[in-house]
Image (cartoon, rainbow, N blue to C red):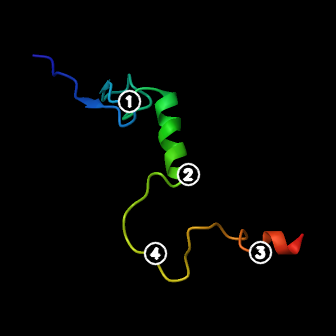
Amino acid sequence: MPETPVTVHCPTCNRPVEWSQHSPYRPFCSRRCKLIDLGAWLDGSHRIPGSELDGESSSTAGDSNDEGER
């Protein structure tokens, strides 16, 4: 009896995605959905909850005084 492939829902658009070698972007349904999710992490829309560690801030290194140095 052949096994039924596991199906998950794309985190971006909620389409069903077969969890197998035939779905190279899994758990996403497409490259587009994968890039949309990446963009959300990069712009801060997605983040892991918790307090910031000592010495870390939400800005990237070098952004704080760029205007004053020019």
Q: CA distance from mark 2 to mark 3?
A: 22 Å
- Quadrant of image for the C terminus: bottom right
Residue 46 coordinates in the image, percent (x, y): 44, 52
Residue sitting at x 54%, y 44%: 39
Q: Amino acid at mark 1?
A: Cys
Instruction: Choose the circle earlier in sequence order: 3 or 4.
Output: 4
Which residue does the numbered mark 4 point to in the structure image?
52
- Helix or strand or loop: what does disc 3 sit on? loop
Badge 2 amino acid: Leu
What residue does disc 3 label? 65
Callouts 3 and 4 close, C-beta under 8 Å? no
Which of marks 2 and 1 precedes in the sequence?
Answer: 1
Which label lies toward us, 2 or 3? 3
- Residue at 27 percent of width and 31 percent of height: 8
Q: Is residue 12 above or below residue 60?
A: above
Q: Point out residue 50 in the picture as x, y percentages from the top left corner.
A: 37, 70
Q: Amino acid at mark 3?
A: Asn
